[in-house]
Amino acid sequence: MTERRAGSLEQSASTLGIGPSRLHWDWDQGLTVAIDEIGTPIPQRVRGRVHVTPHFINERVFTLDEAGRHRWRPVAPSARVEVELQKPELRWSGHAYFDRNWGDEPIEDGFVYWDWSRGEFAEEESAILYNMDRRQGGPKQMALRFSPQGVDEFEPPPNHRLPRTPIWQVPRGSQADAERPPKVTKTLEDTPFYSRSVIDTHLLGRPITAVHESLSLNRFRSPIVQHMLPYRMPRRRR
């Protein structure tokens, strides 16, 4: 993820290019991401291809705040991914998920904090949970089940507190069946304001493994974190 100036942007109905990297959408083939970047904080080439094949396409857009400034669309709630990198030399395939968020104001202006998680019941059936603390309108929870037949909303289960991340102590929590609290099995990313983890949880009476994210926007907007961001996400002229 590299921040670049407007002159580095190319866009058409099916392609988005940012610098030397680009995404291309084909209704028959799915999404292809061509990556050609320099990693940080230790400079190293990251080059290769990621291909995402949706099992089905979700057309529904969800509004996350009271004023309608922040929207979210899980484009492919269930998909397959193939990763082929030349630098570093790495290849694998597995389950995938593809969504998009967009808004009319900075995300930190609309939210204090949120937890998000997604897990698969079966190859083409998945559940997504949102637990948000909004700056206006108070808390909001969403519990959604996606399949090729569409999306069903169900009663959000109770929220359970999870251990903070080991390094930056980011708070974590997740909704799960009342008598079956979730457990963190692996922390994938631990930053000053964001965490990504794998959790074992229980939803609708069924065990499920999910990818979990926590995002603290109060931490994100702090001057210290803003000063640190360019070291994690470099900014280039081209």
Image (cartoon, rainbow, N blue to C red):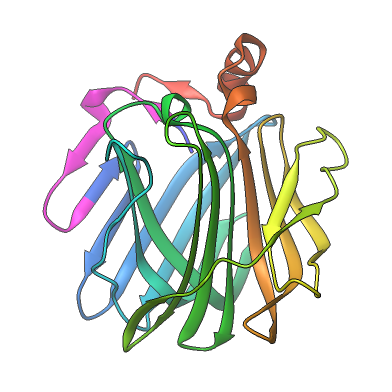
Asked whether 9 falls inside the magenta stretch, the response is: yes
Q: Nearer the viewer, residue 152 or 190?
A: 152
What x and y, as percent, mark residue 192?
71, 29
> Residue shown at 36%/19% (left/top)?
237
- 30 and 120: which is toward the camera: 120
Horizontal side, residue 131 vs residue 142: left or right: right
Residue shown at the point (82%, 61%) measured from the top left: 184
Residue 12 shown left or right of residue 171 in the figure: left
Residue 3: image location, x then y, percent:
42, 28
User: Is residue 53 positioned above or below 9 on the image?
Assistant: below
Q: Quadrant of residue 65?
A: top left
Left or right side of 13 for 140: right
- Identify which residue is drawn at 55% across, 59% down: 86
The answer to whether one can see residue 91 in this image is yes
Left or right of 55? Residue 169 is right
**Magenta-drawn segment:** 3-15
Vertical relation: 230 (above or below) 50: above
x, y percent for residue 217? 57, 29
Residue 186 place in picture, x, y as percent = 81, 60
**121 relative to 107, above or below:** below
| Residue at x-position 73% and y-position 63% | 198
- Between 133 and 114, the residue placed more toward the observer is 133
Quick check: 51 above or below 235? below
